[in-house]
Amino acid sequence: MRVALATCLQKPEPDPDEELLVAALAGAGVEARVLAWDDPEAAWHEASLCVLRSTWNYPHRPDDFLAWARRVAAVTRMYNPLPVLEDNHHKSYLARLAARGVAVVDTVHLARGAAPDLAALLDERGWDRAVVKPAISAASMGTWRVDRSAAAASQQRLIADVALRDTMVQPYMRAVEEPGERALIWIDGALTHAIRKTARFAGEHERVSAALPIADDERALAEAALAPIADSLLYARVDTVRGEAGAPRIMELELIEPSLFLAEHPPALARLVAAIVARLRE
């Protein structure tokens, strides 16, 4: 085995990229095996390279996941690298992006155990509708929407969430409906394509468009977000939405296990395979 593609024992949903990537690597003469991060029998030390893919259950066991990543990074090369995982697994990274002057969706971070007043929070921010999500999440796990008129009725739901985990509250961005949330795919030093995603909440399926061109202002935003670590990354996904003034803002910066929508843009698959082959030769 030369490349291990990291997944999980029970994926919450299928990974459309997986079969395409395994086949394309085989076509390039690279043996790839799909191994689960939560499988104690997986032989990570036998891989020359570990590429994280659909490790989508890790938000349920984030400490175990990071411990696994540290063990794997000690026996083989990992992409994206361990420091990226450690920084990106908790969405407090949005505050660090904002501190660098990168435009992000406004976010209120609530530490586990806090006692927020949802109605007061929405009034203070001037939000008539908001989205609540865990600070460590994947596939819209635990994400829900609340209107200001329902804030009092939703207070206990928020308190229950915050009692369990760090949580974040963001304004509901109307542009997720039209022109839509846009995922910008970045592979080995370059943005390759974008897709449009429909708004998605807990329990819903993801629907995406065909590949789309990337607008100049989206490109500038993504490159600014990735600039400090771009040289270390194999892949990234920058999820954006346009604000009230029309400028794009980052909703999420996916650096651990993003779907890359390779079926929607075959040149991106070819670029990813070439990048993996190049790293095997290093």
Image (cartoon, rainbow, N blue to C red):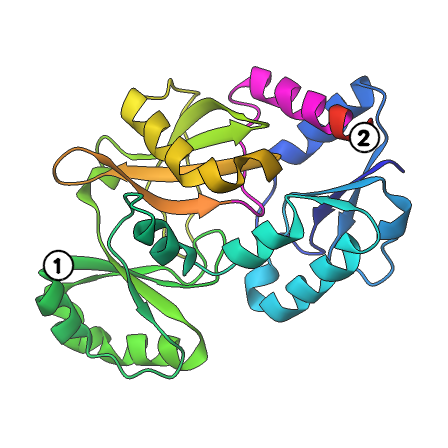
Rendering coords of residue 190 (x, y %):
51, 23
Q: Nearer the viewer, residue 150 or 102?
A: 102
Q: Which residue is mark 1?
A: 127
Q: The residue under label 1 is which amino acid type?
A: Trp
Segment colored magenta? 255-277
- Secondary structure of the residue carrying tag 1 is loop
Left or right: 74 in relation to 242: right
Q: The residue under label 2 is which amino acid type?
A: Leu
- Quarter holding residue 18: top right
Q: Nearer the viewer, residue 30 or 228?
A: 228
Label 1: few (<14), some (14–19) or many (≥20) C-alpha neighbours in 10 Å:
some
Classify the position of the N terminus by image quarter: top right
Residue drawn at x 72%, y 56% is 9
Q: CA distance from mark 1 to mark 2?
A: 49 Å
Residue drawn at x 42%, y 56% is 93
- Secondary structure of the residue carrying tag 2 is helix
Rendering coords of residue 29 (x, y %):
85, 21
Q: Which residue is mark 2?
A: 280
Rendering coords of residue 43 (x, y %):
88, 52
Classify the position of the C terminus by image quarter: top right
- Quarter holding residue 161: bottom left
Vertical side of 215 occupied by 75: above or below: below
Let me know if residue 269 is in the magenta part. Answer: yes
Rendering coords of residue 120 (x, y %):
12, 75
Is any atom of residue 61 visible in this view? no
Left or right: 71 in relation to 130: right
Left or right: 123 in relation to 36: left
Is any atom of residue 17 visible in this view? yes
Label 2: few (<14), some (14–19) or many (≥20) C-alpha neighbours in 10 Å:
some
